[in-house]
Amino acid sequence: MIWNTGIAEPDWRLVFSDAEEIAAATELWRIITTEMFERGTLAPSNAPLIFRLIVVQTFYDRAARQVGAHGAVVAPRKGNSRAIPRINPHFSAMTQLSSEARALEGELGLSPRTRAVKRSELRNARRGATPADEFLRLVPGGGRGEPIK
């Protein structure tokens, strides 16, 4: 489906088989692309990054459901005297997926921290050169007690 953003949404049925995950991916796509469109940061070249972010977020949610159901620590096997509790592999996956999602959000300017940087980059790119830029340019030899030539 194409929202007001002009970028075609992927067919999530090719990636996910669970109806709830497909619905969640569709909603995330709408939220992310609409937000980026409204801020003027959406471009067709962003589509693969947005796709990866949504896949990572969906896998994170899947792992979180498993951790919620079974806990962060897996109990030792009964009947084995050497068995010890261990970290749930889904919990480890959540840690890695969270890190990947944070990096992708930063690339897309979606996290609050990077949003401000991207906004200022856009503002500067749109603004172009101004008379103040010429006035404030660096002068070779100036600024260290040396006379300006």
Image (cartoon, helix red, strand yellow):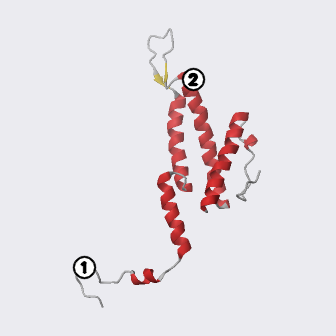
Callout 1 touching callout 2 (CB < 8 Å)? no
User: Which residue is farthest left?
Assistant: 145
Q: Which mark is residue 69?
A: 2
Residue at position x 51%, y 31% in the image: 91
Q: Regarding mark 1 in the picture, which secondary structure is present there?
A: loop
Residue at position x 55%, y 50% in the image: 104
User: Which residue is farthest front?
Assistant: 38
Tell me residue 107's x, y (percent).
Answer: 54, 55
Asked whether residue 100 is in view, the answer is yes
In the depicted view, which residue is nearer to us: 93 or 134? 134
Rendered-image quadrant of the C terminus:
bottom left
Tell me which amino acid carries mark 2: Ala
User: Which residue is farthest right?
Assistant: 1
In the depicted view, which residue is nearer to us: 64 or 131? 131
Disc 1/disc 2 C-alpha distance (Å): 64 Å
Tell me residue 45's x, y (percent).
Answer: 65, 60
Tell me which amino acid carries mark 1: Arg
Q: Which mark is residue 144?
A: 1
Task: Please tell me which of labels 1 and 2 falls first in the chain.
Answer: 2
Tell me residue 129's x, y (percent).
Answer: 50, 80
Asked whether residue 48 is in view, the answer is no
